[in-house]
Image (tube, helix red, strand yellow):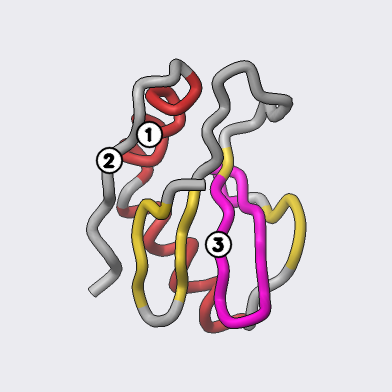
Amino acid sequence: MPALSMFYGIIVRMQSEKGGKHSKPHIHALYGEEEIIVSLNGEVLEGKFPNRQLKMLLAWMTIHEDELYANWKMLSEGEGYFRIAPLK
């Protein structure tokens, strides 16, 4: 699963969806032992994160919404992906 970005100990990944089972665009994020799956509209689908890290992740997702959707489309079509700038 490609890592799109890393910041403040959070690793953001997106699954290649070519022919995949997921219909809702989403990311996977890791922070230490915690893993969370969040739809690109900010809905937590699975898992949990500490509150502070969740707020940072959601802020980053808002800032980079267009890039996240572009990556989802590219990965769904088997065209690869591009990295996204970290939260600063």
Vertical order, 24 against 9 (above or below): above
Residue labelled with disc 2: 82
Kindly indicate whether the residue at mark 3 contacts the one at mark 1 (C-beta within 8 angstroms).
Answer: no
User: The magenta stretch spans which residues?
Assistant: 27-42
* Circle 2 crowding by C-alpha within 10 Å: few under 14, some 14–19, many from 20: some
Q: Amino acid at mark 1?
A: Asn
Kindly indicate whether the residue at mark 1 contacts the one at mark 2 (C-beta within 8 angstroms).
Answer: yes
| 3 or 2: tag closer to the N-terminus | 3
Asked if residue 32 lies left or right of residue 47, the reply is left
Which of the image's four quarters has the C terminus?
A: bottom left
| 1 or 3: tag closer to the N-terminus | 3
Residue drawn at the location 57% of the way across and 27% of the way down: 17
Vertical order, 66 against 32 (above or below): above
Q: Magenta stretch containing residue 33, yes or no?
A: yes
Image coordinates of residue 50 in percent, x first then y, are 63, 82
Image coordinates of residue 82 in percent, x first then y, are 27, 40
Q: Alpha carbon of mark 1 to alpha carbon of mark 3: how far?
A: 15 Å
Q: Amino acid at mark 2?
A: Phe
Residue drawn at the location 61% of the way across and 44% of the way down: 39
* Circle 3 crowding by C-alpha within 10 Å: few under 14, some 14–19, many from 20: many
Q: Secondary structure at mark 2?
A: loop
Q: Nearer the viewer, residue 2 or 86?
A: 2
Residue 29: numbered disc: 3
Q: Magenta stretch containing residue 59, yes or no?
A: no
Q: Amino acid at mark 3?
A: Ala
Residue labelled with disc 1: 71
Image coordinates of residue 8 in percent, x first then y, are 38, 81
